[in-house]
Image (cartoon, grey):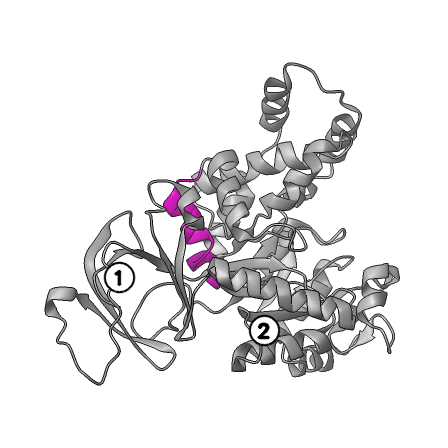
């Protein structure tokens, strides 16, 4: 691909008139177009004036909570739509791994038009598995006793549970709810020994955010959950639930946020290289629910403050595919003070870090997967240009939105 404008991986600078060479499914060379020597055996695509960014990664989706044949057909339809907007990989954060394994395999080999799918095995405390979603995901078996959906308590054989989770083909273990700090430490320690990453909600009802962050997880989800670090915040939450909106909403929430101190959590996240899977898209849903609006108001302020402090933040929609990661990127810019390049990094490099795949995708580098999004306008100037799709490349294969 010749004569591209490429954004540099770690700055706002652009590389003008560059050529990217792809061999099989990987990037084999990146060089100024003037230095590229044409070869008749290599297909050349002239893309003068087009802009290229890494293929987007949605770090928080759910495709198989309750899989049926009809929902499988809809999942394939939505996955195709996602790929053709420039999303080349997704991280599924809990569901029926039997269905997800099939989708992941079909996406990988090209039987369906879809992003790469990295899915999870879920672990939680025993009480969580009365949740209807877990029962739906365990059809044909028992919720909490499936290899990909395990109830954990003090008597659990964590070595076996982690081995079974890994055996499902999952790319990571998702810790969801109702786990003690001792259980968290055991899971993460064993997962590291067996070389499978662990993802977690930012709070687990028993284990606190600081305990989870320090345990060795690589990402935590739901920014608003950081509030649960301090038990004293429970009284604040009760105040927020009963709050009635007024014309001074911004001032009210600014003052409420000043009562909170997340500085030690931010330091801990930076020290441990933990990515915050902020999920602004799902927080926005709470904006129109008076008793839950605090999640939106406090959550977006946490995201903005964490970002300014230097916490790494990915882009995950968590909206059951009612919106895609591009919507999340725009919210990070318009609601949380990100620059467009910050939002692009969130949806590429940091989403790859959160998933545990940065060594093979998430940036444009020689040796990495050829997952690229080509645009007709510069998204660094305006994040809305992330929708101006011209061409998508996933694992070296070309896809045209039209």
Q: Where is residue 269 in the image (x, y as percent from the top left)?
A: 51, 51
Residue that badge 2 annotates: 171
Residue depicted at 24% across the width and 49% down the height: 13
| Mark whose residue sits in front, 1 or 2 | 1
Q: Give the range drawn in magenta.
A: 338-352
Pick whichever, 354 or 402, lies toward us. Answer: 402
Q: Number of numbered discs present?
A: 2
Residue 388 located within the stretch drawn in magenta: no
Residue 322 x/y as whole percent: 65, 51
Query: Taking 43 as reference, is 138 left or right?
Result: right
Q: Which residue is drawn at 78% across and 57% down?
A: 178
State the image coordinates of residue 109 (x, y, percent, origin top left): 53, 82
Residue 242 or residue 114, whichever sits in front: 114
Where is 302 relative to 374, above or below? above
Q: Which of pointers 1 and 2 lies earlier in the amino acid sequence?
A: 1
Residue matched to label 1: 47
Q: Residues within 10 Å of mark 1 (few under 14, many from 20)?
A: many
List x then y, in percent, for residue 237: 74, 32
Give the quadrant of the N terminus: bottom left
Measure the C-alpha gap from mark 1 to mark 2: 35 Å
- Residue 2 shows which numbered tag? none
């Amino acid at each position: 691909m010749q004569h591209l404008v490429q954004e540099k991986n770690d700055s706002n600078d652009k590389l003008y008139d560059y050529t990217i060479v792809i061999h099989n499914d990987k990037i084999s060379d990146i060089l100024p177009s003037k230095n590229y020597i044409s070869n008749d055996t290599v297909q050349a695509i002239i893309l003068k004036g087009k802009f290229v960014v890494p293929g987007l990664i949605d770090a928080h989706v759910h495709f198989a909570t309750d899989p049926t044949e009809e929902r499988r057909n809809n999942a394939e339809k939505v996955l195709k739509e996602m790929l053709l907007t420039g999303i080349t990989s997704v991280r599924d954060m809990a569901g029926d791994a039997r269905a997800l394994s099939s989708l992941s395999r079909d996406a990988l080999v090209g039987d369906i038009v879809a992003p790469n799918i990295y899915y999870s095995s879920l672990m939680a405390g025993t009480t969580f598995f009365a949740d209807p979603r877990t029962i739906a995901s365990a059809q044909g078996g028992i919720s909490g006793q499936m290899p990909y959906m395990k109830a954990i308590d003090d008597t659990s054989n964590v070595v076996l549970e982690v081995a079974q989770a890994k055996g499902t083909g999952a790319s990571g273990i998702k810790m969801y709810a109702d786990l003690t700090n001792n259980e968290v430490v055991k899971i993460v320690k064993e997962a590291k020994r067996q070389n499978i990453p662990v993802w977690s909600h930012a709070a687990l009802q028993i284990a606190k955010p600081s305990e989870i962050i320090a345990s060795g997880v690589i990402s935590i989800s739901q920014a608003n959950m950081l509030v649960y670090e301090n038990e004293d915040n429970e009284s604040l939450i009760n105040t927020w639930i009963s709050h009635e909106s007024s014309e001074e909403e911004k001032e009210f929430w600014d003052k409420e946020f000043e009562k909170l101190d997340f500085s030690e959590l931010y330091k801990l996240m930076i020290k441990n290289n933990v990515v915050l899977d902020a999920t602004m898209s799902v927080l926005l849903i709470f904006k129109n629910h008076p008793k839950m609006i605090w999640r939106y108001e406090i959550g977006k302020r946490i995201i903005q403050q964490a970002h300014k402090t230097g916490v790494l933040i990915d882009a995950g929609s968590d909206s059951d595919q009612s919106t895609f990661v591009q919507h999340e990127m725009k919210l990070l810019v318009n609601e949380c003070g990100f620059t467009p390049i910050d939002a692009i990094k969130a949806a590429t490099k940091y989403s790859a870090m959160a998933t545990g795949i940065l060594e093979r995708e998430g940036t444009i580098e020689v040796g990495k997967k050829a997952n690229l999004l080509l645009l007709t306008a510069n998204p660094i100037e305006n994040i809305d240009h992330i929708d101006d799709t011209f061409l998508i490349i996933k694992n070296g294969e070309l896809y045209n939105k039209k």
